[in-house]
Image: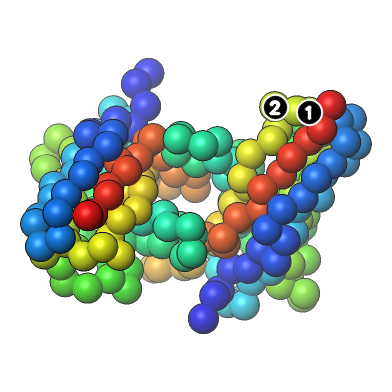
Amino acid sequence: DQQVKQNSPSLSVQEGRISILNCDYTNSMFDYFLWYKKYPAEGPTFLISISSIKDKNEDGRFTVFLNKSAKHLSLHIVPSQPGDSAVYFCAASPVYGGSQGNLIFGKGTKLSVKP
Amino acid sequence: KAGVTQTPRYLIKTRGQQVTLSCSPISGHRSVSWYQQTPGQGLQFLFEYFSETQRNKGNFPGRFSGRQFSNSRSEMNVSTLELGDSALYLCASRQQGRVGYTFGSGTRLTVV
């Protein structure tokens, strides 16, 4: 049973336009949500996170939106650049007492930004 | 500041053998987690260590084990290897109280 779902395996966007990557989750106990970017032959790189008490977090070209009632979050990249082409993973962190516990990942969305 | 270092980068083993993978976290990071990445299952949590103690464990068979040393370095071991254990094994570390994990580049294990 997948607790974090990324329903679009791939997304193609023109350079300069907005990229919107979506993620749905089922467990209302998740406390933090994170986005990672992964290039081939490298480990995932942390991009941006959002706490469950917020609905938006922004960092440069990257903005994450959280809709708790819909159990949905999205990552917006504006403007998209060819270097953004990678696999993007959505991850959620459950609450484990004082620990943030392990991360539960979606299966990723491959973003291709065309020049 | 050095990142998370995993060794070896690539490994080929035969079914039935065992393997040990190593991870050196970022200096000062006491929490180390291990993940398995496969094309079909994505990134799956194996276990997390903090101050030499296993704090969380994922849903993997007992053939998968790990440990953490006093200098926060960690190893994971897989015994009686199966073909399905072929995967990219990723180690990640973080500072206590921080959200984002920093991942290493992984060890690509191929079981033949």
Position of residue B36 measured from the top left corner of the image (x, y, whole percent) = 36, 56
> Numbered disc 1: what chain?
A
In percent of the image, x 70 and y 66: which residue is there? Answer: A7
User: Label 1 sits on what residue type?
Assistant: Gln
- Vertically, is B91 above or below B25? below
Q: Quadrant of residue B43?
A: bottom left
User: Label 2 sits on what residue type?
Assistant: Gly
* In the displayed structure image, the side of residue B68 where residue A99 appears, left or right: right
Say which quadrant the C terminus of chain B sits in: bottom left
Position of residue B7 measured from the top left corner of the image (x, y, whole percent) = 23, 34
Quote the CA–CA distance across marks 2 and 1.
5 Å
Label 2's element? helix
Position of residue B63 measured from the top left corner of the image (x, y, whole percent) = 15, 67
In percent of the image, x 66 and y 63: which residue is there? Answer: A6
- Vertically, is B30 above or below A83? below
- Could one spot residue B45 in this view of the protein? yes
Residue wearing tag 2 = A83
- Could one spot residue B72 in this view of the protein? no
Dot 1 surroundings within 10 Å: few (below 14), some, or many (20 or more)? Answer: many
Residue contact at pointers 2 and 1, CB within 8 angstroms: yes
Asked whether A55 or A113 is in front, the reply is A113
In percent of the image, x 32 and y 73: which residue is there? Answer: B59
- Vertically, is B83 above or below B101? below
Residue wearing tag 1 = A81
> Numbered disc 2: what chain?
A
